[in-house]
Image (cartoon, grey):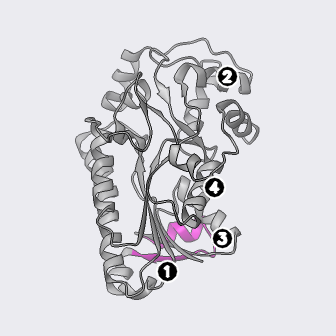
Amino acid sequence: MHIAIAGGSGFIGAHLVKNWRKQGNQVTVISRSCAKVRSELPLTDCVTWDELAAQPDRLDGVDAIVNMAGESIHSGRWTNERKQRILLSRVDTTQKIAALVEEMNRKPSVVINGSAIGVYGMSDEARFDEDSLAAGSDFLAHVSGQWEAEADRIPVERLVKIRTGVVLGVEGGAFPKMAEPYKLFAGGRIGSGRQWLSWIHIDDYVRLLDFCLHTQNVSGVVNATAPHPVTNDEFGRALGQALRRPHLIPVPAFVLKLLFGEMAELLLSGQHVAPTRALAAGFTFKYPSVKLAVQDLVSKM
């Protein structure tokens, strides 16, 4: 199988590239610049967006396109300029993919496009699955809604919109930052500790996208979260236990708001999201509980 992936040099994308190459697939990374791709993923085929604009048939006949591109939402305060970059990095790439597929004579059989569970909005009480309304009104809900609206314009036979939760891995993402206070004996609940964390182990995330790629009856919205969300307090206790560190020192909400501004809502709010469609389609999780996931990740640090 020939798979093209946008965002292939990021934390999640690099895991996908390595997994699909290990399976014997041909993988082409689409990037603004191939220098980083070639340094981090040696011997990986790469094509730039400029090259594709000049030669739209460069990927003609590719079996699948996977779009994981987008600026990180975790690195720094959400200034107006940064919020615009976060939005445009997702919308522009998806628009480019729609235009690329439109130009192809032999179109891919499936496109998997990134999205986020933020589309549901934040709540400590509600329970969400793929049939829930995408009714959030905050910044991340707005970004995810526009992201998915652009994905719906991709002229492809099968489109999967993968609504991603917090992906836990040791090479990047949120987990190393979450573990750092515990390593320093300063870990504890954040805010009230009651906010939900809908998480997924990076290995299960990679397995789920591979499952979506090969399972013909999977299309539309798929939640990429483990089957057992936990509260922030429960997650912290599991992390402290795995690291053999105390879970004692709370971080008040006002401190996070002073440090991070609007971005603090990422830590102080959450959603309880279930992967109903993945489970119904027959996907099984290697790490269904946060205890198993955190123990595995800590063993790799």
Q: Earlier in the sequence, mark 4 or mark 3?
A: 3
Q: Residues within 10 Å of mark 1 (few under 14, many from 20)?
A: many
- Which residue is the site of mark 4? 207
- Which residue is the site of mark 2? 240
Foreground tag (4 vs 3): 4
The amino acid marked with disc number 4 is Arg
Spatial separation of the CA atoms under disc 2 and disc 4: 27 Å
Q: Earlier in the sequence, mark 3 or mark 2?
A: 3
Spatial separation of the CA atoms under disc 3 and disc 2: 35 Å
Spatial separation of the CA atoms under disc 4 and disc 3: 14 Å
The answer to whether 61 is drawn above or below residue 216 in the figure is below
In the rendered image, residue 135, in percent from the top left (x then y), is placed at 28, 38
Left or right, 206 with respect to 81, comes to right
Looking at the rendering, which quadrant does residue 159 occupy?
A: bottom left
Q: Earlier in the sequence, mark 2 or mark 4?
A: 4
- Which residue is the site of mark 3? 21
Left or right, 142 with respect to 24, comes to left
The amino acid marked with disc number 3 is Arg
Which residue is drawn at the image coordinates 58% and 46% (left, top)? 279
Q: Residues within 10 Å of mark 4 (few under 14, many from 20)?
A: some
Which residue is drawn at the image coordinates 61% and 11% (left, top)? 248
- Which residue is the site of mark 1? 62
Label 2 sits on a secondary structure element that is helix
Q: Residues within 10 Å of mark 2 (few under 14, many from 20)?
A: many
Q: Earlier in the sequence, mark 4 or mark 1?
A: 1
Task: Answer whether labels 3 and 2 touch (C-beta < 8 Å).
Answer: no
Spatial separation of the CA atoms under disc 2 and disc 1: 45 Å
In the rendered image, residue 200, in percent from the top left (x then y), is placed at 58, 41
Question: Magenta part of the protein: which range?
Answer: 33-48
